[in-house]
Amino acid sequence: MSRELFQRLRERAVQIHVEDHLRARLERGDRLRVKLGLDPTAPDLHVGHLVVLDVLRAFQDGGHTVVLIIGDYTAMIGDPSGRSETRPMLTEEQVAANAETYFQQVDLVLDRSKIEVRHNSEWLAGMSAADVLRLMAKATLQQVLQREDFADRMKSGAAIGAHEILYPFSQAYDSVAVEADVEIGGTDQLFNLLFGREIQKSFGQEPQDIAVFPLLEGTDGEQKMSKSLGNYIGLAEPPEEIYGKTMSIPDRLIERYVRLVSGLDPKEQADVLAMKPRDGKAALARQLVNRLHGEEAARRAEEDFDLKFRKRELPQEIEERTVANPKDLVAALVETGLGSSRGNARHLIEQGGVRINGQKADVDAELKDGDVLQAGKRRFVRIRVG
């Protein structure tokens, strides 16, 4: 089992550090503490998180202890990884509300009874100024600023918030606090995970082994899946949304999705990849809904999709939403939740992605009571004028 686990890691990971050390620990039967940190900066986990959650499940099945760090304290700072600008700082209330939803979503993949759940406010919130200074003395400013996102922002003249420097120290100290043997994450977390090794050594601990895994592209096929970019498939979204969004991914991403997040065994993966792109995506969409919501939900989601798009009919049930000003289509899209902001709503209209009763709408279009407003291929609301 230990060799099989290491082989699975080796096949999926972009990088393992230190590979020989981790292999030896697994082969001699060490029981490892395997850490994953999640900052609740948004209320929903997405399909991209399945990449690392599936790895954690493999560790669980191998008898290791999964330590899930809910970064309720670091989320207020904001992880600068992969950012070209400073993240907005969240309030304690926002972080708490987001974290509350994580557990039921994690339960879709992991065995909750075998998870050690910790909040990093347990050790970070009680630190005195002297404690913080002692922690920051464990590394140099040059070490922190060499990370790619900071270096790029310095070159371009973009601002780096002074508080952002605290993030890698805080995240690294999590590994000290829970005595992590292994930490996993996406490739955008490589600096943070390596930094954790250095901070552990400075506290006299054996440094954790690390493994980083691919970042899954979002439904746009370009940028990594992210709720802030609007290209995500949420784990907690309705089955119909998961199915429809999966059907919208570019054909060239079918193989990555199948191999990284489908949960299918190698033979089943090969069967899906041998299909025509349209059929392969349908099989992938069914499987994702099945693993998140069950077989019956997958059947209904497929029927709903076929009703909408293969038969070119409206769904049987359309949610009703009230709008205050039917003459302002941009505002109506935002009010009904079909647009995330006025800018996003205007962009949808300009790209031809908004229809009223099946007809493409321009920005000056007016709504009437009972109209069916559609954004993209999958989202419909029936308008009620307030």
Image (spheres, rainbow, N blue to C red):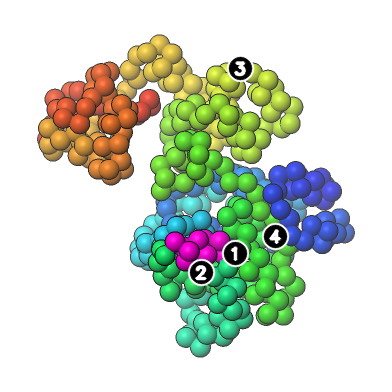
Is residue 62 part of the magenta span, yes or no?
no
Mark 4 = which residue?
210
Residue 178 location, quadrant: bottom right
Q: Amino acid at mark 2?
A: Tyr
Q: Residue 148 in magenta? A: yes
Q: CA distance from mark 2 to mark 3?
A: 45 Å
- Helix, strand or loop at disc 2? helix
Which sits earlier in the primary sequence, circle 1 or circle 2? 2
Residue at image location 54% in from the left, 36% down from the top: 292
The range drawn in magenta is 147-156
Q: For the residues marked 3 and 4, what is the alpha-carbon distance in whole angstroms?
A: 38 Å
Q: Which label sits on residue 276?
A: 3
Tell me whether circle 1 and circle 2 mark residues in contact (CB < 8 Å). yes
Answer above or below: position of 116 versus 123.
Answer: above
What residue do we see at 27% from left, 38% from top? 345
For residue 192, the mark is 1
Q: Residues within 10 Å of mark 2 (few under 14, many from 20)?
A: many
Circles 2 and 3 in contact, beta carbons < 8 Å: no
**Which corner quadrant of the image does residue 349 belong to?**
top left
For the residue labelled by badge 4, is the local secondary structure a helix, a strand or a loop? Answer: strand
Q: Which badge, 4 or 1, comes first in the chain's sequence?
A: 1
Precedes in sequence: disc 3 or disc 4: 4
The amino acid at mark 1 is Asn
Q: Which residue is mark 2?
A: 167
